[in-house]
Image (spheres, rainbow, N blue to C red):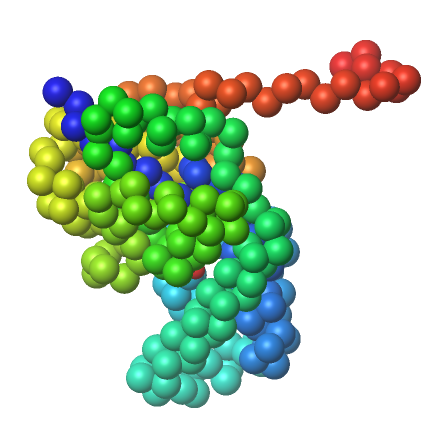
Amino acid sequence: ALKALIFDVDGTLAETERDGHRIAFNRAFTAAGDDCQWSPDEYGALLEITGGKERLTHYFNHLAPAAIATRWAQLSPAAQVELVATLHRQKTTYYTELLATGAIALRPGVLRLLKEARAAGLQLAIATTTTLDNVTALFTHAGLADLIEWFTVIAAGDVVANKKPAPDIFTFAMQHLHCTPAQCVVIEDSLPGLQAAMAAEIKTVLITLSYYTRNQDFTGAALVVDQLGEPTLPVTIVGGDCAD
Ligand code: XBP
Ligand code: MG
């Protein structure tokens, strides 16, 4: 029988990437004096690399403008790791500051789903690539600070060595839930997330709402839905031409 729901965060609980994480990365570049900014399109391609530190490292290794790439290549491996860690810490600060402005709400239906699952006696878990700080800030600044305590386990960021699409974060969550894959369902929004859940052999519900990932190929998902039960109402333009 079903015993637990395991939720992804970015893109699943809220639309966090383009106007959240991306902006925070760009602020961290500016603060560090790095002359680069990620455009929405460029950031979309970079999402293929999950995890902020991994994404930064990939960028410096393969995509950065020549001046930055040259400086990066001259650093020792240890100095590269340190630079990425510093930038990423800074980025997390900017991201949580951005959340503190109330810029990002939970998706419609998330709170109801969590309440209903809890009332039905299911355990709740989070399995995310991002940091615990970011998850806490998302709930707190959505006015739901207590939500964090509803989860049996918050598996976040660097608690495992290999990020999604590796199964590790889901395996970690299941260990803490004391559940088998057959007793869990994962809620995800992206291909790396689906691949990770499939590798952990957990049935996955895919929500196709995220700006960057909604058109990915979700073959293998148990269910693909475009809402959590609260359809986005069509916008009525008063006095306007609503032909389409
Ligand atoms: C989300 C990610 C993360 C965020 C930021 O993937 O890929 O890297 O962009 O994370 P998922 P950081 O939704 O599949 O967990 O806090 O590491 O920058
Ligand atoms: Mg996601």
Quadrant of the rendering where the C terminus is positioned: top right
Residue 71 or residue 208, whichever sits in front: 208
Residue 111 or residue 63, whichever sits in front: 111
Establish if 63 lies above or below 193: below
Circle count: 0
Residue lying at the far top in this picture: please name it. Answer: 243
Residue 195 point in image, percent of width and height: 28, 38
Residue at 33%, 20% in the rendered image: 223
Residue 236 point in image, percent of width and height: 77, 18
Question: Is 185 on the left-hand or right-hand side of 51?
Answer: left
Establish if 113 lies above or below 160: above
Residue 220 or residue 120, whichever sits in front: 120
Residue at 37%, 63% in the rendered image: 54
Residue 133 point in image, percent of width and height: 39, 60
Q: Quadrant of residue 52?
A: bottom left
Question: Is 93 on the left-hand or right-hand side of 132?
Answer: right
Question: Is 156 on the left-hand or right-hand side of 226?
Answer: left
Residue at 28%, 25% in the rendered image: 119
Quadrant of the rendering where the N terminus is positioned: top left
